[in-house]
Image: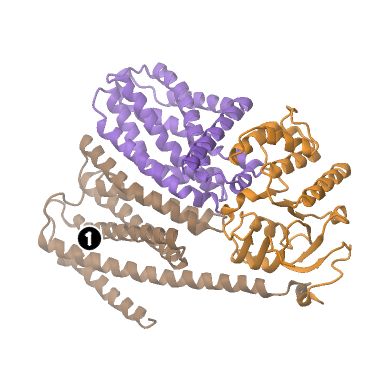
Amino acid sequence: MTEQAPVVAVSNLIKQFGRFAALRGVTAEFAGGKLYAVLGDNGAGKTTLLRTLAGLNQPSSGQVTILGSRNFHDICHQVGYMAHPSLLYDEMSGSENLAYFSQLYGIPTRARAAEVIRSVGLDPDLARPVGQYSQGMRQRMSLARALLHDPRILLLDEPFSNVDLRSAGDMVRLLAGLRDQGKTIFVVTHQASLLDGTADEFIWMEAGKIIGRTPEFNANGPSVRLPEHRV
Amino acid sequence: MKRAFPILGILTAILLSYALYLALVGAPTEQTMGDVQRIFYYHVPSAWTAFILFFANFGASVYYLIKRCPKADIVALVSAEVGVVFCTVVLVTGPIWARPVWGIWWTWDMRLTSTLVLWLIYVSYLFLRRFSSSGQTPLLAAALAVLGALCVPFVYFSIWFFRTQHPQPVMGGGGSIDPRMLHVLLINWLAFSCFAFLVCWSRYRLETLQREVDEAHAFRSLTDDPRSNR
Amino acid sequence: MTQSRSTTRGITLATLWKDLRLEWRSKDAINSMLFFSLLVVVVFSFSFDPSAEESRQIAGGLIWVAFLFAAVVALNQTWARELRNQVLDAYRVSPAPPNSLFLAKVFGNFIFVIVLEALMTPLFIVFYRLRTIGPAWQLLLVAAVGTWALVVNGTFFAAMSIRTRSREIMLPLLLFPISIPAIVAMVQATTSILNGEGARFWIVLLVTYDLVFTTTCLLLFETVLSAE
């Protein structure tokens, strides 16, 4: 059986902010078509890792290879990014926001935007500006923005934070569906229990390194640690 | 390399003393202005030295933008700092000179005005370096340095034309200069340049050491096992 | 290649249109800035009360200083909306070229500042009993070229200030020194025209300044935008 090339590969990734080392040598490969949950305490480097994958941080040293390319701009069409801030304009409605981002991505019609808004469970005709949305709606619209250009890879940073349980459940189901379509999804979250049973793999980070990768979630930490991190 | 610095230091001290002697005693007294004119031997070489340093800053910044070489960044920083100091000398000696001669503290003289604008540009450069919270401060500073350097010809042209429309007193002799005075001027310039070079070198070493310390700290935080600190 | 150029133009126009619509919708910034401009003119009038003859000599300087203040206030909020919800990150992750964003912001600021100037100028004319001896169309040309000089550098430095502490003070701190030749040119050109003298040298200087700095800012903007 031929082995497929990993969709995302990082090699000895180091990121330092002055004297603080956020990532201290992360090496990993991630296969396509899976949902990865990235877990860890605050300051473990989860957000930094995601932002580095999204091309928003330049690594201090090390390589990031996404879809075979080391230059983020070559594959930026294939990556969707979502963070805790909504990355949307508060003064425009959801449709207007997505219409603008459609133009940034070279999507000619508005149909795609409407379709993607519906897919996250919102109404494309809602004229209310995003600034007046509830947190759950805002997160969903932000996810819609990340999905707009149908990327192969999704990088989601804390998508469920401050979201009510029902909306969060809807989002998890949506993500599972996207994973089943073949997308590769990275979710950084503190609410790992939401992804229990859905995520294909849980990536445990601590102090800027990956210390374990497990197929199931255990509240006490990874059941199996990577060799160099065994206490 | 380490021995060159003290040797150069002694040579510069000798040269500066000789230049001082020439300026205050050796040079002939100017007809119209008298002994006050001797400040010319500090005013002009400081200006020339500052311009050379700012040109070095421009070159280092362009090099950094192209090659991202950290040494170039240090050269840019150092030349800007020392250049600002020499600029300040020009801006202080100018009014000191102008007051007894023309009775005014300031004149929109070509050299004085353009030095003032350069001083403002490079002080703003130093402010950017100080206030930047980015990890890419050298890049931002290099971009600013390029813009600042491109501004220089415009500064000259605008002041030149402004002066033709609004004639101002000219400082420092517009016409030909006595060869003996020129000799003193050039000696002083040589002395100032050596001194500037020494200061830049010393500051360069200081900055390099500082960065090495920072890198050592950063490396330590990288390799330390944080669990051992709990 | 043609596709990328048309996309750049398309994105620039789309961004500009979005900014203008948002500005129109909120009207917060516009209203406060219009009122600010009015205040500046009134305060200046109290400070300087010249005769009609004198006013032609100093009006050029006064007007442009007033425009400069208004421009700085406008420029300081160039990126405010993009920073509020980290929309700038969304832009950086997208395939849109950074220069489209830059040009859109420069055009937006240009329109904004021209509107402010259009409002302040009649007030100045009234308060200072100004009448121009030279052709008025030249004054419009100077206004356009001079405003572009302020706005192109201002937008660039506003982006630079994002990565600094004391953001609001860094913008004028960086902008003013480099703008000095342009300000001298604007003021001298305006004064010359008001007094019926030629301003050709100053206008040529301004146009050259605009070309050089617009090109350089376009070349360097991507570097500044991707600074962390």
Asked if residue B160 can be seen in this view, the reply is yes
Chain label for disc 1? B
Q: Relative to B112, is A137 on the left or the right?
A: right
**Chain C visual colour:** purple
Depicted B133 relative to depicted A144: above or below: below
Seen as rendered, the residue at the extreme bottom is: B3
Q: In the picture, residue A17 is in which quadrant? A: bottom right
Q: Going 34% across and 33% down the picture, which residue do you hit? A: C186
Asked if residue B99 can be seen in this view, the reply is no
Q: In the picture, residue C136 is in which quadrant? A: top left
Image chain in orange: A
What percent of the width, then of the height, locates residue B117? 35, 47
Q: Nearer the viewer, residue B148 or B182?
A: B148
What percent of the width, then of the height, locates residue C216? 40, 47
Q: Nearer the viewer, residue A190 or C142?
A: A190
Q: Which residue is mark 1?
A: B41
Seen as rendered, the residue at the extreme front is: A1
Name the image colouring. by chain
Q: Going 66% across and 65% down the picture, which residue do you hit? A: A10
**Crowd around label 1: few <14 · some 14–19 · many ≥20 (10 Å):** many
Q: Quadrant of the C terminus of chain C?
A: bottom right
Tag 1: amino acid: Tyr
Judging from the image, what secondary structure is the residue with disc 1 in? helix
Image chain in brown: B
